[in-house]
Image: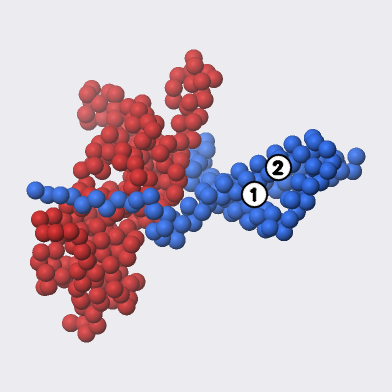
Amino acid sequence: MSDTTIRLEVFRYRPDNGGPSFQSYDVPYHDDWVVLDALNYVKNYIDGSLSFRWSCRMGVCGSCGMQVNGEPSLTCAAFLRDHMPGPVRVEPLTNFPVERDLVVDMNGFMEKLDHVKPYLVREDEADDLSAEYLQTPVQLDRYKQFSMCINCMLCYAACPVIGRVDDFIGPAALALAQRYNLDSRDQGKQMRQDVIFQNEGIWECTFVGECSEVCPKHVDPAGAIQQAKLEGAVDYYKRLLMPWARRS
Amino acid sequence: MNRPLDRRLGWTWWTRNGSYFRIFLREATSAFILAEIVLFMLLIHKAGQDAETYLAYRDFLWHPLMVVFHLVALAFALWHTISFFLIAPNALPSQVAGRRIPAAFIVGQQFAGLAAVTLLLFLWVAWVGAT
């Protein structure tokens, strides 16, 4: 057991037990421990009432996103050594309603995600469910970066527009819409247009860019949104100047 | 009954960290550019009036405090321009005709364009001054 300790200042909120507060815990320091390890230590050995989400512990599931010293981070990838000598302040993701302690309400995010149809849409899907839709490496390269999203919601916590505009579809959902719109196998672009081109869609983004800064998978949602804006503007002028041409 | 706690970033979001503050400041540069445009429009307006009015306004623009203002506006304009050029590759499609375009190429093209337009303007002003 390590002799060195590090202090965690953990956000606590129990809706049936007063307002929010911070609670301090001294946990053993290990060079290879991440913040999630420290939280699990608290849960297992100090205070079993602490609530937080986690699952894979390896940056794949996107469950353990929290504010670590004010930065939206995956706690399974935030090493304690980067925050020595502490304290490490752990809070729930900003911009989300807090259900309890470090657990946020994801329903709004899930609804927004659902709006953009983040899956391959095929007009002929009903005809042949076993069909293969082949793709070249160049076609894959067009959207691959945007397909790495793990829905960890760090980008929503980093986005000041999300904090001001309730209905803004937000970085991850818009990046996923762009990801499927760029996919050569997809035929659902027209179905997504009404959502991504509405006022609360891409045009609400002011290109602060923090979503891309905090993304643990380097998806660059801000880039995806700006690309969608450019496509939308080009499409608009095409329809204005060449009304007889088919929409892309 | 559960009462979810609202912890959204409020209107003071830009004071929250250095990164937000820089972005806020970058957007605020537009106010300086607007002010410089207004000053320039006034200069044109004064030029259409008598010489005394024009020279008085020109002296006002050369007042030390106004020179400081122009320098601050220039610094902000350059900062906005350079930061805009640097993020432009993120906003453009990654491929053109199936080929990936290097970010450095896009950034370089913009700086080259800016240099070319600046040079042309200098040459034009020099030519007008000489004739």
Q: Which mark is residue B111?
A: 1
x%, y% of residue A195?
34, 31
x%, y% of residue B15?
42, 58
Q: Residue at x 83, y 38 (%)?
A: B50
- Mark 1 residue type: Phe
The answer to which of A114 and A50 lies nearer the viewer is A50
Q: Residue at x 33, y 62 (%)?
A: A70
Subunit ID for the residue under disc 1: B
The answer to which of B85 and A217 lies nearer the viewer is B85
Q: Quadrant of the C terminus of chain A?
A: top left
Give above or below for A156 relative to B46: below
Among the 4 quarters of the image, the one containing residue A65: bottom left
x%, y% of residue A14?
13, 58
Q: Nearer the viewer, mark 1 or mark 2?
A: 2
Q: Secondary structure at mark 1?
A: helix
Residue furthest out toward the bottom: A3
The answer to whether B93 appears left or right of B41 in the picture is: left
The answer to whether B35 appears left or right of A56 in the picture is: right
Give above or below for A230 relative to B30: above
The answer to which of A102 and B6 lies nearer the viewer is B6
What shade has chain B been given? blue
x%, y% of residue A66?
26, 59
Instruction: Tell me, by letter, which chain the rendering colours red.
Output: A
Q: Which mark is residue B40?
A: 2
Residue furthest out toward the right: B131
